Amino acid sequence: LVPEKENFRSFSIRIMTRVCVLGAGYMGSAITFPLSDNGNGIHLWGTWLDNWILDECSRGQHPKLNKSIPENVSLFYAGELEEAIEDVEFLIIAVTSEGFVPVFQRALDAMKRSSPLFCLTKGFVPVSGEVNRISEVARCMFHEKFPGEEFRWVSVGGPVKAVELSDRVPTSTMFGMNSSVVTPLLRLFSTDYYFVSYCDDVCGVELCSAFKNVYAIGLGIYDGLYEVERDKYSHNLKSILFNQSVQEMALLIERAGGRRETAFGLSGIGDLYVTSASGRNRRFGEYLGKQYTPNDAYRLMNEEGEIAEGYHAVHHGMKFINTLENSLIEELPLFEMLYRIIVQNKNVEDELRRFLKGLGMQ
Amino acid sequence: LVPEKENFRSFSIRIMTRVCVLGAGYMGSAITFPLSDNGNGIHLWGTWLDNWILDECSRGQHPKLNKSIPENVSLFYAGELEEAIEDVEFLIIAVTSEGFVPVFQRALDAMKRSSPLFCLTKGFVPVSGEVNRISEVARCMFHEKFPGEEFRWVSVGGPVKAVELSDRVPTSTMFGMNSSVVTPLLRLFSTDYYFVSYCDDVCGVELCSAFKNVYAIGLGIYDGLYEVERDKYSHNLKSILFNQSVQEMALLIERAGGRRETAFGLSGIGDLYVTSASGRNRRFGEYLGKQYTPNDAYRLMNEEGEIAEGYHAVHHGMKFINTLENSLIEELPLFEMLYRIIVQNKNVEDELRRFLKGLGMQ
């Protein structure tokens, strides 16, 4: 179902637009594929941790996507940030949530004028003990540098496995924008394999992106626990977990000021479906289901060069929930279960039983 | 996670309530487990096609659930309908959609007074060339027998694989009721492994039950096509199908006069998640993905004693859609794709490509 090569440019923009992607990991590199197929020129900037990735890209192969990067992509090393963002139309931020503040601060320092910001980073940003949504943190940082200027922000969410996008298999995604000014830019992303939808609910898209990583761990735990014991495996029960995840995301968004519906679309159920079917957070959950401690599971994956972002999102998510409303956690029994397992090291089967007991009381 | 045997009756009702289940197939028999664990007395009536099932039950084993039926269940053969429904508090209808009208008519003929009706039958009922929701057909039939009396109806939907329920694994379900009079009866079903939620959207629950069988075929088709060719398999794309299924169900419900939210809960995403992960409709889809013709796939399953209800639901669903609004099908591209594959025998890969092309145009 991958479109024919000659069709890639059916949506192409004849005048080449220059954009800069910050972060050369999975998603940052994958997004260059539709952008390049549309004829844009992409500056792919690697952080100080990405040097080895850029080295291998130069040698012909992106080491995580296992293919060469597209033709319209130029590589920039950590020290070349100023050159990378010079004269670009907009920035795409695709570093990890831990890397967000230092990288975005450096970018702001180097920016000569304000530009729209697209964000592929998922999760929460801890700033001096507080936890906040990335867009809120970014807004403050932005206005320190550009007081009075419009903060144009797009949170990119939705069901996208980076390797698949770089294989050009059909992929849908949701862009949550705070300003209609950026709408015309969406054409630069849209191809006949990368389908861009958009909405005005930055908060919803952002919270889905963060929390689906947490809930995907839950579904992974379930599979880890029972996949070897088929007679104990239950689709009924797994579906309870999936449905509950979506309902809790909808509630979280609502209480945080976003729109419930966002959880019921591509960025919510769509992304949770992908994230729980495969990927790092799901795998982290599987380890937990197989009785690894959270720290061991995290370390194990780290040794393989992978970070389970959901692990951090559970810690930060709880802090975020507490900033909203003190008793909100009582309405989020599945999140609480995951917190107890992942942060408080409780036994997975006991916790699952406890969660189910709560359902029975309704 | 199956509760301890001694806990089964934690929700039990001390005064035994007598209920009758019409249909001794998967779901009719499975629902007797929570009912029996709650101390109810269940009359399980088999249709004229169920004689062999009852025979085997008497010999000790339900042939589809592969276990003995619960202790509080009495068996009634097709000819014993009057005895089966005498003095029961309410009826549970669990026959196939094809069997619904003849069975319900016989039951009405035998009923001495009106009673609440719980319906586990899914799909549409064709009556003299027209297609309608089961509850609407039932309402007309009911009022012919009991003019002026209150039609108390509960559509039971949600993510329940019958075999798993009969294994007493934790299971959530949604009861869509048209009358709050029946609310107290829900306690008769609730156990510490069968969690009953309810809403007032009969239309939504009913349409989800019917259409998720259709959409589960779609997800089965995808797996059938690509599961052997892992390099062509894409979670991004499968997630497009899952999300699109839910959005189309929500739209269908809305246009039919129900509530969109119903598609975003247990009866929609919950049930689709289960139905597309395993089961008959999914398997029917897999055959189509492996290039069997719809008729061959249907026949093959029939020979194994299984009916893919989604096959009928596609035919009937299209008629139902046309009764709502002539151009509605244009807003349901995934349903249309499935109709073209299943009813018009079009090639699956061509149709998937066509569907995706439509998404790109948005």
Image (cartoon, coloured by chain):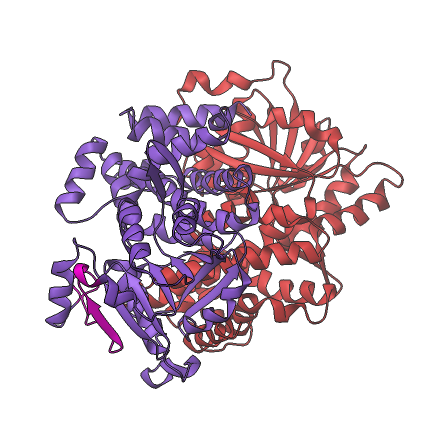
Chain colours: A purple, B red
Picture residue at 67% right of the left edge, 50% below the top: B100
Up/down of B241 relative to A3, above or below: above
Residue A75 on the magenta segment: yes
Q: In the displayed image of the protein, which residue is found farthest to the top?
A: B14
Residue B219 horizontal side relative to residue A200, left or right: left
Picture residue at 54% right of the left edge, 58% below the top: A199
Residue A270 or B190: which is nearer the viewer?
A270
Residue B126 or A132: which is nearer the viewer?
A132
Q: Quadrant of residue A214?
A: top left
Picture residue at 71% right of the left edge, 51% below the top: B101
Q: In the displayed image of the protein, which residue is found farthest to the right?
A: B148
Confirm whether residue A319 shows in the render. Answer: yes
Residue B310 horizontal side relative to residue A114, left or right: right
Residue A162 horizontal side relative to residue B330, left or right: left
Place of residue B95 in the rendered image (x, y in percent of width and height, measured from the top left): 61, 46
Up/down of A112 relative to A132, above or below: below
Residue A301 horizontal side relative to residue B268, left or right: left
Q: Quadrant of residue B79?
A: top right
Residue B125 or B237: which is nearer the viewer?
B237
Image quadrant containing the N terminus of chain B:
top left
Place of residue B106 in the rendered image (x, y in percent of width and height, measured from the top left): 74, 45
Picture residue at 80% right of the left edge, 44% below the top: B142
Q: Main secondary structure of the magenta part?
A: loop
Per the rendered image, the range of residues in magenta is A62-80
Place of residue B174 in the rendered image (x, y in percent of width and height, measured from the top left): 59, 38
Total labels drawn: 0
Residue B201 on the magenta segment: no
Confirm whether residue B228 shows in the render. Answer: no
